[in-house]
Amino acid sequence: MSQDRRIDPKTFRSATILVAESNRATRQALRNVLLGMGFPSIMLTGNSGETMRQLMLDPPSVLLLDHKLPGGDGLMLVRRLRRDSGELGRIPIILMIEAPEAALVIAARDAGVNEIVIKPPAVEALVRRLMSVLKEPRPFVRVKGFIGPDRRRLIERRRGDRRFIELEPEDIPGNGDRRKGGGRRTGKDRRSKANPA
């Protein structure tokens, strides 16, 4: 991993992360990865009840949240947190999902998550998401029908576009195996194939 992609332990030595993940082995693996990045305090929970208790007891800098957390899914917890008018409502949330389904990504965006990462998260993707929420957080929005980080990236806000959270190509399992040039053909492509010169 290049130096500019690495979390700087000096910059983030006071950052705490709560990993809310249903699978014990995955929780431990994520804890080890995060400790290796330089985060000194990693809290672990395995269900929604534990997660809510830990959040109220000691709010973290970032919540790394399993979409399928037992005791109520992750999005339910996100919506509950975003309704809180205090510190809990503004906690950066990185949602971990198993597949990049468009409907789920849109629902997560509308619930108020900051970032999305595919499970199991690649270290590079996790670092990028953590850097995004800790070093370059998007403005927090509280309007009728939506509470959470601005759904547009900085470049999209400048252009005035309204797009949802984008996944990086390397975040999508099997994406590296796709053949190059396999996109949709245009009408011109089809015509030239039908009438070779």
Image (cartoon, rainbow, N blue to C red):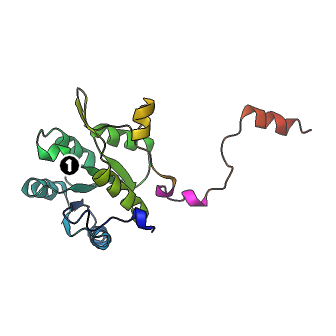
Residue 128 appearing in the image: yes
Q: Position of residue 115 (x, y in %)?
A: 34, 49
Question: How many discs appear?
Answer: 1
Residue at horizontal 38 percent and vertical 37 percent from the top: 152
Residue at horizontal 30 percent and vertical 68 percent from the top: 30
Q: Which residues are magenta?
A: 170-177
In the image, residue 129 sits, relative to residue 195, either above or below, namely below
Q: Position of residue 76 (x, y in %)?
A: 23, 44
Residue at which label 1 appears? 91
Most common secondary structure along the magenta stretch: helix
Quarter-of-image position of residue 32: bottom left
Return the residue nearer the eye: 65 or 63.
Answer: 63
Return the residue nearer the eye: 181 or 127.
Answer: 127
Residue 122 appearing in the image: no
Quadrant of the frame with the N terminus: bottom left
Q: Position of residue 58 (x, y in %)?
A: 10, 58
Quarter-of-image position of residue 68: bottom left
In the image, residue 178 sits, relative to residue 10, either above or below, namely above
In the image, residue 166 sits, relative to residue 24, either above or below, namely above
Q: Residue furthest right?
A: 197
Tag 1: Cα neighbours inside 10 Å, few (<14), some, or many (≥20)? many
Residue 176 in magenta stretch:
yes
106 on left or right of 82: right
SS class of the residue under badge 1? loop
Quadrant of the frame with the C terminus: top right
Residue at horizontal 67 percent and vertical 54 percent from the top: 180
Residue at horizontal 69 percent and vertical 50 percent from the top: 181
Q: Residue furthest left?
A: 57
Q: Position of residue 120 (x, y in %)?
A: 39, 63
The amino acid at mark 1 is Ile
